[in-house]
Image: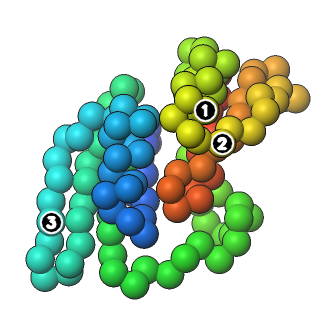
Amino acid sequence: MELLGIHHAAIICSNYNKSKHFYSEVLKLPIIHELYRTERDSYKLDLALPDGSQLELFSFPGAPQRPSYPDAQGLRHLAFKVADIANAKEYLEQQGISVEEIRVDEITGKQFTFFADPDDLPLELYQL
């Protein structure tokens, strides 16, 4: 078996419209497909990332909240590659999003920072 990359990451949100706006309008990820599943009262939204991978956004009524931030077992955060981290940070802050100060990875020497989506899911920007 040879893994070729990540196809998608899936996120369950608490407020579908708010999260859809955040990922498609604020982060500017193009919508590939949107589906409402009546039998589950649930949305599924596929969003494209520039490298060909995808984010899947789900809504499920009554889904439990994340138990702790950010060190719950399971996925810790999603990291997005950016060419200009200062510009990306400034853009997010102009959108009213709180972004941590830019830090330097002590191993790679690359700059990174964190922010959160509408459900407080930790997201990272990592400069190439």
In this rendering, which labeled residue sits more in front, label 3 or label 1?
Answer: 1
Give me the residue at 14% from left, 71% from top.
37
Q: Which secondary structure, mark 3?
A: strand
Residue found at x 42% / y 36%: 26
According to the image, what is the colour scheme of the structure?
rainbow
Amino acid type, callout 2: Ser
Q: Is residue 122 above or below residue 54?
A: below
Query: Mark 2 packing: few (<14 Cα in 10 Å), some, or many (20+)?
Result: some
* Residue found 23% across the figure and 72% down from its top: 42
Helix, strand or loop at label 2? It is: loop
Q: Quadrant of the C terminus?
A: top right
Q: Vertically, is 42 above or below 28?
A: below
Q: Is residue 96 left or right of residue 42?
A: right
Q: Nearer the viewer, residue 59 or 3?
A: 59
Find the distance from the CA under tag 3 to the CA under tag 1.
32 Å
| Residue picked out by circle 3 | 36
In the rendered structure, which amino acid carries the disc numbered 3?
Tyr
Q: What residue does disc 1 label? A: 93
Q: Residue 70, labelled with which disc?
A: none
Residue 58's quadrant in the figure?
bottom left
Check whether the beta carbons of the residues at disc 2 and disc 1 lie within 8 A of each other.
Answer: yes
Q: Position of residue 74 (x, y in %)?
A: 61, 66
Tell me, for residue 98, which label it has, or none. 2
Q: Residues within 10 Å of mark 3 (few under 14, many from 20)?
A: few
Element under label 1?
helix
